[in-house]
Image: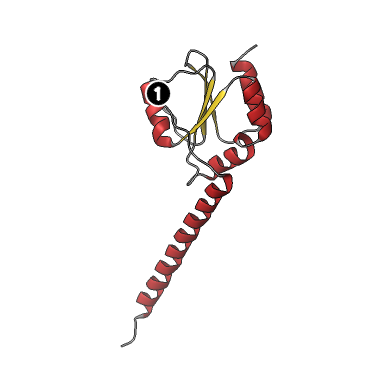
């Protein structure tokens, strides 16, 4: 019995689609392993002066991956944040939404979202998308004046 041509085409399309899904999942996991990335635990009751909370979905968002790779993992940025006594927390969307609701901040609508908090735990600024070290320094000078 011969397979109808339409069924053959549909089967081929299904196999190609599943192959693309599998490969994209594989490469996303490889990128996460490459960074050695782990989300930070966010305790909504905990208070620390001068925080940057970056809400990321590194497994599905290419821009989140770039922000972590190019900015937050940089030794220069880590050293700068230590000098300024600023804590950086990188959290997943679920924890980020919980944090925003708990503190009654306006909801965020895209990733990555970096939320700058002052020493009183109040949101001072949000930065959406990928940004560089110069923009980070400008934000910190504005938010945490010396």
- Which residue is nearer to you in this view: 81 or 64? 81
**Is 9 positioned to the left or the right of 36 in the image?**
left
Q: Which class describes the residues within 10 Å of circle 1: few (<14), some (14-19), or many (20+)?
A: some
Q: Is residue 14 above or below residue 55?
A: below
Label 1 belongs to which residue?
Answer: 44
Question: Which residue: 57% across, 45% down?
Answer: 35
Question: Which residue: 44% across, 36% down?
Answer: 92
How far across and how far down the image is residue 46, in percent? 43, 20
Quadrant of image for the C terminus: top right
Question: Which residue: 56% across, 35% down?
Answer: 129
How far across and how far down the image is residue 109, in percent? 44, 33
Question: Which residue: 53% across, 47% down?
Answer: 32
Q: Is residue 19 above or below residue 130?
A: below
Farthest residue toward the left? Answer: 1
Which quadrant of the structure image shows residue 78?
top right
How far across and how far down the image is residue 66, in percent? 59, 42
Which quadrant of the structure image shows residue 79?
top right
- Which residue is nearer to you in this view: 86 or 5? 86
């Amino acid at each position: 019995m011969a397979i109808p041509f339409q069924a053959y085409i549909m089967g081929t399309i299904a196999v190609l689609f599943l192959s693309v899904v599998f490969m994209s999942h594989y490469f996303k996991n490889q990128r996460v392993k490459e960074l050695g990335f782990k989300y930070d635990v966010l305790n909504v009751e905990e208070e620390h002066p001068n925080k940057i909370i970056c809400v990321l979905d590194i497994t599905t968002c290419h821009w989140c991956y770039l922000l972590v790779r190019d900015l937050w993992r940089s030794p220069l940025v880590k050293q700068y944040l230590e000098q300024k006594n600023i804590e950086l927390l990188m959290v997943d969307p679920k924890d980020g939404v919980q944090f925003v609701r708990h503190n009654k901040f306006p909801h965020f609508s895209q990733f990555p979202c970096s939320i700058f908090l002052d020493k009183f735990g109040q949101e001072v600024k949000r930065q959406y998308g990928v940004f560089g070290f110069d923009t980070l320094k400008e934000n910190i000078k504005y938010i945490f004046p010396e």
